[in-house]
Amino acid sequence: MDFMLWYDSLFYPRDTFTAERDHGSFKDIVIHILLSGLIYGGIVGFIYEIFSSLHGDIVIETMRDLFGRYFLFSSIFLSPLLFLLILFFLSSIIYISARFILDGYGDFLTQSYLLSLLMCPLILISVIRIIPMIGKIIFFILLLYSIKPLLIALKVTHRYDTRKAIFTLISSIVLVLLIFSIIIFLLSHSGIYVFFDFKTRAIGFRNIKILTSETVYHGNIFEFSILNTMNEGIIIMDIHPNGDCANGIVDLNKKTKKFESFVTLDPEHVLEVKIFNCSKKFLPRGKFSVPIKFQYQEKKIGRGITHLERGIIEGLTS
């Protein structure tokens, strides 16, 4: 296994892809992707296991919610399989565009092998997304840069010019968007999504626990209860909904979005929250997703630090 191929495919793509064009195999593709996926899964799983308060994207948060204490295990072993499926799906779409729309001459195996060499360093680099704010920006810049080696990989595989490579990439993006649009349309109009696990769940919250069994979304009213899991009381200063309830009115026995007075929540005590004027807009019929931001201070004397806690409540409407 020559790990320098990963580096060279990103920064010296023309020479690397030309040299490797006739040397790839299905076994090589699987080994490259599984190995980079294992490294990625191990790093991400370990970091999020150690720093349990760290928040990631929706995929990571969903995995943490689903697998709980087995998150590290699931991250290590599911990440490689996920990346392998992504590679073959994208390579299939690109191959259809290159071969049947733009008359390319390459074969699927060669294209997939060259794309796997480029995908491996991107998988590893994507770990920097963990770094708040700046990490996602850096990764986005590197993704834009990777367009150049991707076009070179297509040119080397299918033996055509840059213009056709660009059209291949554009048509592939259109095909992917079309496929996902059809899938979303079918799911939202057939009720098939009901068979998936769409039970009510709260993702991302730490010290404030959402009692999902008491969560109800009916009409334009969203109701839920929160529990203080800290060892001391907290003073809730603001509850700010988003998504479906971005324009909603928060009611804590006071029908005002900006609280006239702060609300104290002692340890293991429950607070009922109602949000009026919610409206479903984007998700399939029957499914809701409401991001919530809590702003609070610890009740203990001498603590003036304001904490922000964000998360998402999702499930099916009643």
Image (tube, rainbow, N blue to C red):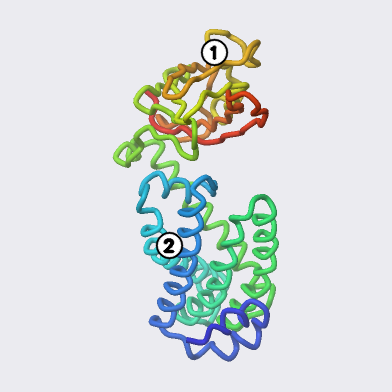
Identify the disc placed on residue 79: 2
Query: x and y percent of residue 78 in the render?
Result: 38, 61
In the picture as drawn, the residue positioned furthest to the left comes out as 195
Q: Nearer the viewer, residue 129 or 285?
A: 129
Which image quadrant for residue 160?
bottom right
Residue where numbered disc 1 is placed? 251
Which image quadrant for residue 247?
top right
Left or right, 148 with respect to 227, comes to right
Left or right, 171 with respect to 88, comes to right
Q: Secondary structure at mark 2?
A: helix
Query: Which of disc 2 and disc 1 is earlier in sequence?
Result: 2
In the picture as drawn, the residue positioned furthest to the front comes out as 301
Left or right, 132 with respect to 267, comes to right
Q: Secondary structure at mark 1?
A: strand
Q: Nearer the viewer, residue 198 or 88?
A: 198
Give me the C-alpha separation between circle 1 and circle 2: 41 Å
Query: x and y percent of residue 135 in the render?
Result: 65, 57
Which image quadrant for residue 121?
bottom right
Circle 1 packing at 10 Å, graded few (<14), some (14-19), many (20+), is some
Q: Amino acid at mark 1?
A: Asp
Please say if 182 is above or below 232: below
Q: Nearer the viewer, residue 95 or 12?
A: 12
Q: Residue at coordinates 43% horizontally, 20% vertically from top-left?
A: 269
Please say if 258 is above or below 8: above
Left or right, 31 with respect to 129, comes to left
Please say if 41 is above or below 291: below
Residue 2 in sight from this viewpoint: yes
